[in-house]
Amino acid sequence: MKVENFCGASPTPKSITIASSNLTFTNLWGYPRPKEFNCDYVEFDSVLLYGTSLTEAYTSDTFPYPLTVKYVITAPSGAVYTPTYTINNKSDFYLYLPVGTRDDLGVENGFREHRIPKEYGEWKIAAEVEMCGTTTAIPAVTATLYNPIEKRLCCASSR
């Protein structure tokens, strides 16, 4: 698709090529890093949702709004948390799911605002993306939150 851009310093039309027809969500980055937050909660660094043409769709503002991203976070105990973000316009990306330069969406604040209780052990994170009435399930990745005291004792005893 070609869009004429009449904005900018020059009144001459400028063509911008976009590829929103190829817009897909494919996978989560395999290394989200859980860590303790405020003693009682867990947060996750580097939760990145990848796809194709995400950066182009963001730059050209051609995402099909609304777009809903629901993360399905499973704690070691089996408890499930579902932080959900509905993106209604380009500004919402900046607030909730900033778009990276490698066709990825990051999670702002590592889910801190959801106050997910801390548990040590293996966590699973999956996602569901609803766009244009279709939901795409993104397979889970895993990460472990280690108890720092047990890890220190474990490592000290093996020396």
Image (cartoon, rainbow, N blue to C red):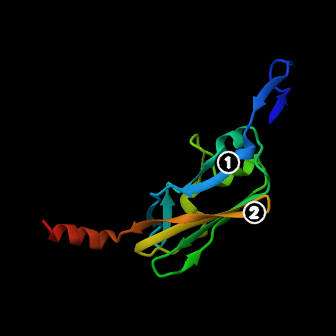
Q: Is residue 115 above or below residue 24?
A: below
- Is 45 on the left or on the right of 115, as rendered? left
* Residues packed near mark 2 inside 10 Å, few (<14), some (14 to 19) or many (20 plus): few
Give the residue at x 63% y 67%.
83
User: Do labels 1 and 2 touch, CB within 8 Å?
Assistant: no
Q: Is residue 156 above or below residue 90?
A: below
Q: Looking at the image, which residue is at 73% across and 52% down?
A: 92
**Residue 94 tag number:** 1
| Occupied quadrant, residue 116 | bottom right
Q: CA distance from mark 1 to mark 2?
A: 24 Å
The residue lying toward the viewer, choosing from 63 and 120, is 63
Horizontal and vertical percent position of residue 49: 58, 54
Give residue 151's mark: none
Which quadrant would the C terminus be assigned to in this image? Answer: bottom left
Residue 118 image point, x, y percent? 47, 73
Tag 1's secondary structure? helix
Q: Residue at x 72, y 43 (%)?
A: 57
**Going by the image, does 22 lie left or right of 143?**
right
Q: Mark 1: few, some, or many residues within 10 Å (few <14, many ≥20)?
A: some
Q: Earlier in the sequence, mark 1 or mark 2?
A: 1
**Mark 2 element type:** strand
Left or right: residue 131 compared with residue 38: right
Q: Nearer the viewer, mark 1 or mark 2?
A: 2
| Amino acid beneath label 1 | Tyr
Residue 122 locus on image (x, y percent): 42, 72
The residue that label 2 is drawn on is: 134
Q: Can residue 107 be seen in the rendering of this structure?
A: no
Q: Is residue 40 visible?
A: yes
